[in-house]
Amino acid sequence: MNASTLIKVNDLKKYYNGEKIKALDGVTAEILKGEVVVVIGPSGSGKSTFLRCLSLLEIPTDGHILFNGTDITDEKTDINLHRQKMGMVFQHFNLFPHMTVLKNMTAAPIKILKKSKAEAEAQAMALLKRVGLEDRANAYPSQLSGGQKQRIAIVRALCMNPDVMLFDEPTSALDPEMVGEVLDVMKQLAHEGMTMVVVTHEMGFAKEVGSRVIFMDEGKIVEENSPATIFENPQSDRLKSFLAKVL
Amino acid sequence: MGTQISPVMAQWLDTAPQWILDLPKGLSDFCYKIFKCFIFDDRYMMFVKGLGNTLILTFFALLIGIALGVIVSLVRVTWDKNGLEMKSGPRKFFLGLANLVCRIYLTVIRGTPVVVQILIYYFVIMTSSDKITTGIVAFGINSGAYVAEIMRSGIMSIDGGQNEAGRSLGFGYVSTMRYIILPQAFKNVLPALANEFIVLLKETAVAGYIGLPDLAYAGSIIGGNTYEYLIPLVFGVALVYLILVMFFTWLVGRLERRMRANER
Ligand SMILES: Nc1ncnc2c1ncn2[C@@H]1O[C@H](COP(=O)(O)OP(=O)(O)O)[C@@H](O)[C@H]1O
Ligand SMILES: [Mg+2]
């Protein structure tokens, strides 16, 4: 295992309904520190399942995930400890509606990392400032636009100082005019060297900041290459037809 | 008037101001009945003490009911969501067992009248406890079953994404429930819980079956002593329950509006 490997996925499988639905059918992949890996593929190809297995929101049927050298699929490892180090951003934001923006961001650092309220709030305010939302600190999620919600969801995850950020179609539920502001935050993160795994249909994002693109279909990785190669010189027919549909 | 005049009448004629005695017959009779049912022999104290017992019974039964209800609903929800996927082992065994116990509890409590339950506690299970303790336990355990089903529907109504967001931040199952799911569930079911509280308040009126002197019991005792039923039951009991229910309904409405204002 390479010294700069952050996540190593070995023959990961996730079946539903016994073996009827093979959402993941043997995925092997490696994510290096500082990489931005973009995952693309048709709907139902297993992209979400892949991300959700990485953060163990789904328990894999088979296979192993090494995170920072620890096998997190081993029953004996503390799942909660590893989840803290993996930030997750969802399509539907999933902000906590009963908490203000600031509380959304400080709850986990205070309750889990045992940070002082002052320290957690200072960090949250600094992050809010970076995404231009410091004036919304005391707002409730219902008072925010979709783009604002997603930016808050991103900085909420950053408050736990994760080693990697996982994004599952972070812009798919947004009105078109709000996609840009979210992608900008993600690009900024990428430039700062954050390791990111991003499921998205924003091919422009993949080309611009992706270190690598993984194309999935039917629960398998069909093709994996630099963005330039994936988009300019696709090898498999399935990728070609997929790109023909989305580009 | 003849020579056979009752002590109540004697005291009434003695203490009532002359202008009341001079009122038209119907009105002065009404005043006499009020005197007889509430003032003579400090009979109003039975209603005051009865009201106190009703409130104590309702309050503590509610506390037990909510505590039981939350625990039972958590066991049920945890089993329904994770039970089948859990690997067999002691944890699955104990959760399954707890779930079974909870289901039996819900079925038995909701399938039998509360009057029968309180009689069983009084005559069979808690024979050496005082009546108020027996009442609190009986109504608390009864209410817990209804609160559990209310809480369960509240928890199920929270979007699964909330749980996932909590877990992905590093909260454990219990912390996610405590900080993220339950506060939202509570808020959603507050009207239903308030309704359960009001039902409970009224239902404690059957405590008289074990001779617990609650508000309704005071009404029937005074009625029996005075042979006046309308005044103690309507004005001493029904009206007081009605005022209490209206007051709590108003209070809950205010609370709800305040909580909603928080999210706007
Ligand atoms: N909880 C589930 N139960 C049954 N089937 C599921 C479940 N989650 C996902 N699947 C199936 O697994 C496959 C992959 O789903 P998903 O990972 O969501 O795909 P994608 O994110 O690429 O659209 C789909 O066929 C989907 O229907
Ligand atoms: Mg998906």
Image: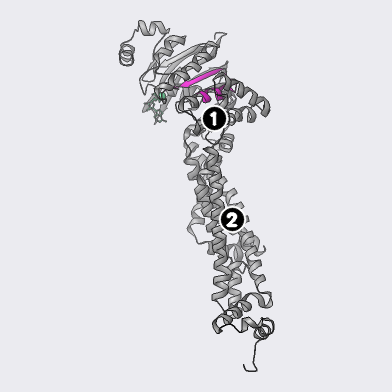
Which chain is mark 2 on? Answer: B
Q: Where is residue A154 in the image (x, y as percent from the top left)?
A: 52, 22
Residue B239 percent location from the top left of the image? 55, 67
Residue A166 in percent (x, y) is at: 50, 20
Cα gap from disc 1 to disc 2, whole angstroms:
33 Å
User: Would you call the spot at circle 2 few (<14 residues within 10 Å), some (14-19), or many (20 or more)?
Assistant: many
Question: Secondary structure beneath disc 2?
Answer: helix
In the image shown, does B249 or A236 lie closer to the viewer?
B249
Q: Name the residue under label 2.
A: B140
Pick the front one: B116 or A41: A41
- x, y percentage for residue A173? 41, 26
Boundaries of the magenta span: A151-171
B214 is higher (above) or lower (below) than B111: below
Rendered image: mark on residue B209: none
Q: Is mark 2 within 8 Å of ligand 1?
A: no
Position of residue B54 relative to residue A5, above or below, is below
Q: Are marks 1 and 2 on the same chain?
A: yes
**Crowd tier of the residue under label 1, counting other residues whose Cα lies within 10 Å: few below 14, some 14–19, many 20 or above:** many
**Can residue B93 be seen in the rendering of this structure?**
no
Q: Which chain carries label 1?
A: B
Dividing the image into 4 quarters, which one contains the N terminus of chain A? top right
State the residue at coordinates (47%, 34%): B160
The verdict on residue A140 being magenta is no
Q: Which amino acid does label 2 sit on?
A: Gly
B124 lies above or below A5: below
Quadrant of the drawing holding the C terminus of chain A: top left
Query: Can you tell me which quadrant of the image ligand 1 is in?
Result: top left
* A120 to B137, vertically: above or below: above
Per the image, the residue denoted by label 1 is B167
Residue at x-position 59% and y-position 59%:
B138
- Asked if residue A161 lies in the magenta stretch, the reply is yes
- Taking the spot 53% from the left edge, 33% from the top edge, the residue there is A140
